[in-house]
Image: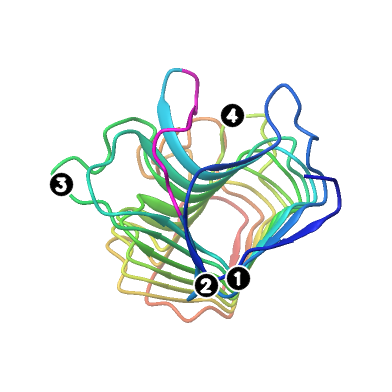
C-alpha cells in the first residue's frame, strides 16, 4: 500500500488480521486511511493469533498499527464467538503510531467458554502504547474485552464514544512507570455503562475528564488513583505516582473516588 492513500472497503465480512507497519519497518504505511461502507456493513473479523504482545504472550490483534497518521473509520472490528486462544486486542497502536484516528467504528468481542483471558496481560478493545495524538471518536465498544480503551499515552482525545459492558474498565489512562508521560489527554462526552469495575480510571496527571455520562459501574464511575491505596487501581498499580492535577468537570455520575492529589472535581 502506498503512503497517504485511502482504501475503500466494500460491504462484506473479511476474516483477517491487518498489519500496518512492523517493528522493523514502522513507517511502511504512513497516512493510510482504511474506510469501510459503514460499521453495520463492513466487518473485519479476527483470523486468529497474529503476534506476540508483549514478547512471549500470544496475541490476536485485528488491526496492528505501527505507522503514523493512520485512520480507521466506518468498520466493524470483531473478535468472534469461540474460545480465546491468546490476548485479544481489537486495535493496537504501537509507539511509532502517532496521530492515529479511530472513528465511527464498532469494536466488539464475543468470546465464549470458561477461559475468557488465557494470558496476562488480558484483552483490550483499543490499546495505545505511548503513541501520541490518538483520536478515538464516535465509536461503539461492546462485548467482553477486559478493558475497552486502555491508554498508556499522552496528548490524545477520547470523545463521543458509547462504551458498554467491559469486564473490568471502560476507559483507563494508565501509568506504566514513574517516568512515563500519561498527561494531556481529554476524555469528553462519552457514555460509559456497565463496567465490571470503574467506568473511567485515571492514573496519570494533567488530564481532563469532561461531560461524560457514566453509570452502573461495578466500582467507581470515575476513579483517580493514589499512592496511599496500593492495589486500589489496576496493574501496574499506583506505586510510582498518584493521579494529580486532573480536571474532572461537569460529568453525570453517581460516584467519583479521588485518592490522588490536587485534582479538581465538581
- Mark 4: secondary structure: loop
Q: Is residue 57 visible?
A: yes
Between the C-alphas of marks 1 and 2, the distance is 5 Å
Neighbour class for label 1 at 10 Å: few (<14), some, many (≥20)? many
Residue at 47% across / 81% down in the picture? 252
Secondary structure mostly taken by the magenta-highlighted segment of the chain: loop
Which tag is nearer the camera, tag 3 or tag 2? Answer: 2
In terms of sequence position, does the residue under pointer 1 or pointer 2 come before the other?
2
Circle number at residue 74? 1
- Mark 1: secondary structure: loop
Report if residue 50 lies within the magenta region. Answer: yes
Report if residue 198 lies within the magenta region. Answer: no
Q: What is the x, y in percent for residue 85?
A: 29, 34
Q: Are marks 3 and 2 in contact (CB under 8 Å)?
A: no
- Give the residue number, with chain letter if any, for mark 3: 113
- Give the residue number, with chain letter if any, for mark 4: 177
Q: Are marks 1 and 2 in contact (CB under 8 Å)?
A: yes
- Mark 3: secondary structure: loop
- Give the residue number, with chain letter if any, for mark 2: 39
Q: Are marks 1 and 4 in contact (CB under 8 Å)?
A: no
In terms of sequence position, does the residue under pointer 1 or pointer 4 come before the other?
1
Neighbour class for label 3 at 10 Å: few (<14), some, many (≥20)? few
Residue at 29% across / 57% down in the picture? 110
In terms of sequence position, does the residue under pointer 1 or pointer 3 come before the other?
1
Which tag is nearer the camera, tag 1 or tag 3? Answer: 1
Between the C-alphas of marks 1 and 3, the distance is 30 Å
In terms of sequence position, does the residue under pointer 4 or pointer 2 come before the other?
2
Residue 214's place in the image compared with 204, above or below, is below
Residue interval drawn in magenta: 45-55
Neighbour class for label 2 at 10 Å: few (<14), some, many (≥20)? many
Instruction: Determine whether, in the image, residue 153 is placed left or right of residue 192.
Output: right
Q: Are marks 1 and 3 in contact (CB under 8 Å)?
A: no
Amino acid at each position: 500500500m502506498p503512503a497517504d492513500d485511502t482504501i475503500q472497503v466494500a460491504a462484506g465480512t473479511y476474516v483477517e488480521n491487518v498489519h500496518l507497519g512492523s517493528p522493523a519497518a514502522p513507517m511502511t504505511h504512513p497516512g493510510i486511511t482504511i474506510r469501510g461502507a459503514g460499521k453495520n456493513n463492513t466487518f473485519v473479523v479476527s483470523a486468529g493469533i497474529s503476534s506476540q504482545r508483549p514478547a512471549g504472550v500470544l496475541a490476536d490483534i485485528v488491526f496492528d498499527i505501527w505507522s503514523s497518521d493512520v485512520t480507521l473509520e466506518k468498520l466493524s472490528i470483531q473478535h468472534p464467538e469461540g474460545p480465546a486462544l491468546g490476548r485479544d486486542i481489537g486495535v493496537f497502536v504501537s509507539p511509532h503510531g502517532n496521530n492515529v484516528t479511530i472513528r465511527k467504528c464498532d469494536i466488539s468481542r464475543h468470546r465464549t467458554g470458561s477461559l475468557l483471558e488465557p494470558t496476562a496481560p488480558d484483552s483490550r478493545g483499543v490499546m495505545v502504547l505511548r503513541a501520541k495524538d490518538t483520536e478515538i471518536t464516535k465509536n461503539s465498544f461492546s462485548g467482553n474485552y477486559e478493558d475497552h480503551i486502555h491508554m498508556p499515552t499522552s496528548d490524545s482525545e477520547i470523545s463521543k464514544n458509547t462504551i458498554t459492558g467491559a469486564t473490568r474498565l471502560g476507559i483507563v489512562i494508565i501509568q506504566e512507570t514513574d517516568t512515563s508521560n500519561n498527561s494531556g489527554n481529554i476524555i469528553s462526552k462519552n457514555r460509559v455503562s456497565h463496567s465490571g469495575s470503574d467506568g473511567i480510571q485515571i492514573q496519570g496527571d494533567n488530564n481532563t475528564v469532561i461531560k461524560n455520562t457514566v453509570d452502573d459501574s461495578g466500582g467507581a464511575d470515575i476513579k483517580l488513583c493514589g499512592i496511599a491505596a496500593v492495589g486500589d487501581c489496576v496493574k501496574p498499580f499506583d506505586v510510582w505516582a498518584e493521579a494529580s492535577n486532573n480536571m474532572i468537570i461537569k460529568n453525570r455520575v453517581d460516584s467519583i473516588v479521588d485518592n490522588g492529589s490536587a485534582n479538581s472535581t465538581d
